[in-house]
Image (tube, rainbow, N blue to C red):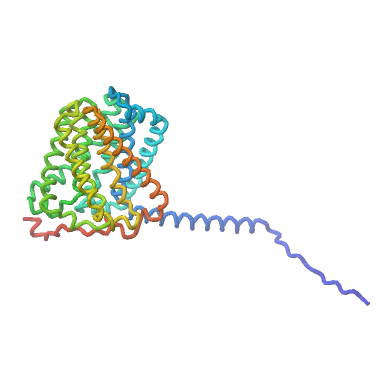
Amino acid sequence: METQRSEIELVTDKNPSSVTGDNHNNQQTLFFIIAKRSSKSLESILKKFHAGYFRISLSLGGQALLWKTLADPSHDTNAIRHVLRMLLHPSAFMALWSLAFSTSFLLSLIYLLRCLFYFKLVKAEFLHHVGVNYLFVPWISWLLLLQSAPFLEPRAIPYLVLWWVFAVPVVVLDVKIYGQWFTKGKRFLTMVANPTSQLSVIGNLVGAQAAAHMGWKESAVFLFSLGMVHYLVLLVTLYQRLSGGDCLPVMLRPVFFLFFAAPSAASLAWEAINGAFDVGSKMLFFLSLFLFTSLMCRPRLFRRSMRRFSVAWWAYSFPLNTLALASIKYAQEVKGEIPHILMLLLLVLSVLVSISLIVFTALNTKMLLPDNDPIVCLPNILPVRSASTTNA
């Protein structure tokens, strides 16, 4: 019996370059797909990004300045201050300042790309009654980082140059905002005034504080007077009729904390100008304490905004940082157990809120750029004037 053997013929490609060419084409296709997806994701980020995200760098910069103030040696021999200085290791401060600097640099780079590729969106933000106030925040953040920088002396030439770079845009924005308030009258201010308008005041006060540390008293007094006069106008407007409560969505209610951030920043700026935490600084500090207590007694105001994580939560941190900073200066001046206990309570609250926000942000990265962002989706309440009215 013959055994039938099946012959198997192996077919081989005699041209191995064709396989290499296919692999090369596949790699090119994969690279094209990855590049296309990356460009789409970058495009989505630039469209959804706005100046409101600088709240993060603002809070971190305020926290860095707070730690630097605590770590600086002073004539205060209180036991609480002594223990706090021992606990704050220089490496921890450097890590915090580096984190704040990296965050500000990254956010500034993203916003610069937004200005280059989507200038129409930036222009719409500039013309918006809420969005324009957040344009102050990048410059405030850099001014805070400048004051808390561990390697720059206030009277050094790089410090002076950087102060001009960060302070001039604040004055330019002042001309735009305060000029409209002055020329268009009370009806316009009542229409556009909201709690975020206090960011313009804080920008002037932080700039005045940095100028006073350089020894430029005239520039500091100029910025301080500019901010405080308009703060009084704004505070009276918001007290008479809180128009901002009507035109702000629920998710933006944490910005109500700016009510006590402005007087706290004013007390710090006046202390830097005058050289002592005198009666004027104490009055502003007590006002900020009163406003802080008033908000804490009304938790229902923030209940709905706390149901889902939002970048707007970072609005809680910076006002607490400024209030804690003012409490440090107050405790140094008054020298008593009660002021130092108050200082310790505000410090603990400020640090805990900042740490909690960092953790919540790290756990909710997918919610950082929502489609229904309250600032992007917020309609402009300013009426559109006709061509004849404009020409008139």
Location of residue 389 in the rendering, given as x and y in whole percent from the top left corner: 8, 58
Q: Which residue lies furthest to the front in this view?
A: 337
In this rendering, is residue 332 above or below 291?
A: above
In this rendering, is residue 11 above or below 77?
A: below
Quadrant location, the C terminus: bottom left
Q: How many badges with numbers are in the image? A: 0
What residue lies at 24% left-to-right and 58% top-to-bottom? 249
Name the residue nearer the viewer: 85 or 61. Answer: 85
Relative side of 70 to 276, left or right: right
In this rendering, is residue 128 above or below 352?
A: below
Quadrant location, the N terminus: bottom right
Q: Which residue lies furthest to the left in this view?
A: 392
What residue lies at 34% left-to-right and 27% top-to-bottom? 82
Location of residue 259 in the rendering, given as x and y in whole percent from the top left corner: 20, 45
Q: Residue furthest bottom?
A: 1
Location of residue 278 in the rendering, given as x and y in whole percent from the top left corner: 16, 29
In this rendering, is residue 318 above or below 240?
A: above
What residue lies at 90% left-to-right and 74% top-to-bottom? 3
Q: In which quarter of the image is residue 165?
A: top left
Location of residue 374 in the rendering, given as x and y in whole percent from the top left corner: 28, 57
Q: In which quarter of the image is residue 213?
A: top left
Relative side of 159 to 176, left or right: right
Name the residue nearer the viewer: 294 or 28. Answer: 294
Relative side of 257 to 360, left or right: left
What residue lies at 27% left-to-right and 42% top-to-bottom? 320
